[in-house]
């Protein structure tokens, strides 16, 4: 998969250093993935959810949320945001 918005991962990792490794692991997995549907995503990330047109990944033991728009046909993942769990719960990703 081609990943757009990679800079969000490093920016978030600078503020939350404990997120760097889990985000890097997500990046490596997602880049090599050949997902065709949310079902394929859930084989690797069982707690990934499809919310309002976005795929939401639990990162770092459920401490963080990575919100991405996946276009399966084009094999692209556009990272929209990376948030703490509490910021996600407050709906800050929708703004």
Image: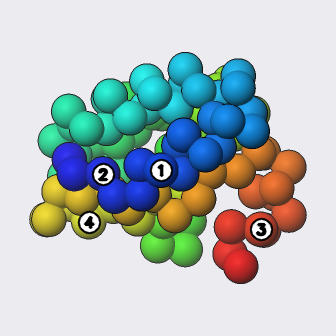
**Callouts 4 and 3 close, C-beta under 8 Å:** no
**Helix, strand or loop status at disc 4:** strand
Q: How far apart are marks 4 and 1 (CA)?
A: 19 Å
Tell me residue 40's x, y (percent): 28, 41
Tell me residue 16's x, y (percent): 74, 33
Q: Mark 1 points at which residue?
A: 7
- Please report whichever mark, 4 or 3, sits nearer to the chain's N-terminal start: 4
Crowding around mark 3 (Cα neighbors within 10 Å: few <14, some 14 to 19, many 20+) is few
**Helix, strand or loop status at disc 3:** helix
- Is 10 positioned to the left or the right of 14 in the image? left
Q: Distance between the residues labelled 3 and 2?
A: 22 Å
Label 1 vs label 3, nearer the camera: 1
Label 3 vs label 2, nearer the camera: 2
Label 4 vs label 3, nearer the camera: 3
Q: Name the residue under label 3.
A: 92
Q: Mark 4 points at which residue?
A: 71
Q: Name the residue under label 2.
A: 3
**Helix, strand or loop status at disc 1:** helix
Q: Distance between the residues labelled 1 and 3?
A: 19 Å
């Amino acid at each position: 998969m081609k990943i757009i918005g990679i800079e969000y991962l490093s920016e978030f990792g600078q503020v939350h250093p404990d997120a760097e490794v889990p985000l890097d692991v997500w990046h490596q997995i997602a880049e090599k993935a050949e997902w065709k549907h949310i079902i394929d995503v859930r084989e690797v990330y069982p707690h990934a959810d499809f919310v309002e047109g976005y795929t939401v990944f639990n990162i770092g033991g459920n401490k963080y949320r990575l919100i991405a728009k996946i276009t399966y046909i084009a094999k692209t993942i556009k990272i929209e945001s990376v948030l703490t769990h509490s910021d996600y719960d407050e709906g800050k990703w929708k703004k």
